[in-house]
Amino acid sequence: MSGHRNQRWIAAATLVLSIALVGTQAGCGAKSHNESSGYTANSYGNDGYLGRTNSYPSIPGRHMALNYKNDANLVQQAIKDVPGVAGSSVTFNGADAYVTIKLDRGVAQREVATVERQAASVLRFNFPRYTIHVKSAR
């Protein structure tokens, strides 16, 4: 009777091992090949875009600047609604962004520093990768 138990135990262990081996080959690797259809399935990194970051290079990644031209446009858009700002120009030097604000005609001299601080605050919040330097011109 004990020989019969050992055979059952060996059969169960063999079954469990074969299932484990099939499971590791089927879905855990980067590629799996289906013998019946001939298709090879690819899996992608967990980037939140299902691998489309390689197909669409304009999707901004983490800690990634697209380029200075796009960043300059985004800087100008970010501060266009700050009260007292009529326009702006941006230059970059590495991680430093130098922003010159063109002030509205109605901005009094005593309000200039406030407008500069508000614009700098908006930019520092939206562009943490840059050290922001703001000055104004009339």
Image (spheres, rainbow, N blue to C red):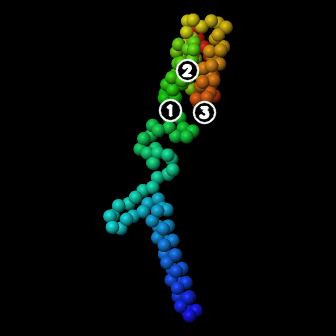
Q: What's the distance in space between the residues labelled 2 and 3, CA to CA?
A: 17 Å
Q: Where is mark 2, residue-wise?
A: 79
The answer to the question of whether label 3 and label 1 lie on touching residues, with beta carbons closer than 8 A, is no
Q: Earlier in the sequence, mark 2 or mark 1?
A: 1
The answer to the question of whether label 2 and label 3 lie on touching residues, with beta carbons closer than 8 A, is no
Left/right placement of residue 55 relative to residue 46 reads left
Query: SS for tag 3?
Result: loop
Q: Earlier in the sequence, mark 2 or mark 3?
A: 2
| Labelled disc at residue 38 | none
Query: SS for tag 1?
Result: loop
The three-letter amino acid code for the residue at tag 1 is Asn
Q: Label 2: few (<14), some or many (≥20) within 10 Å?
A: many
Q: Where is mark 1, residue-wise?
A: 67
* Picture layout, residue 67 above or below residue 62: above
Q: Position of residue 36 (x, y in %)?
A: 33, 67
The residue at 58%/20% (across/down) is 99
| Labelled disc at residue 129 | 3
The residue at 42%/41% (across/down) is 56
* Picture layout, residue 62 above or below residue 39: above
The residue at 64%/11% (across/down) is 112
Q: Is residue 54 visible?
A: no
Which residue, as the protein is rendered here, is positioned at the far front?
A: 1
The three-letter amino acid code for the residue at tag 3 is Arg
Q: What's the distance in space between the residues labelled 2 and 1, CA to CA?
A: 19 Å
- Closer to the observer: label 2 or label 3? 2
The three-letter amino acid code for the residue at tag 2 is Ile
Residue 3 quadrant: bottom right
The residue at 46%/45% (across/down) is 49
Position of the C terminus, as image quadrant, is top right
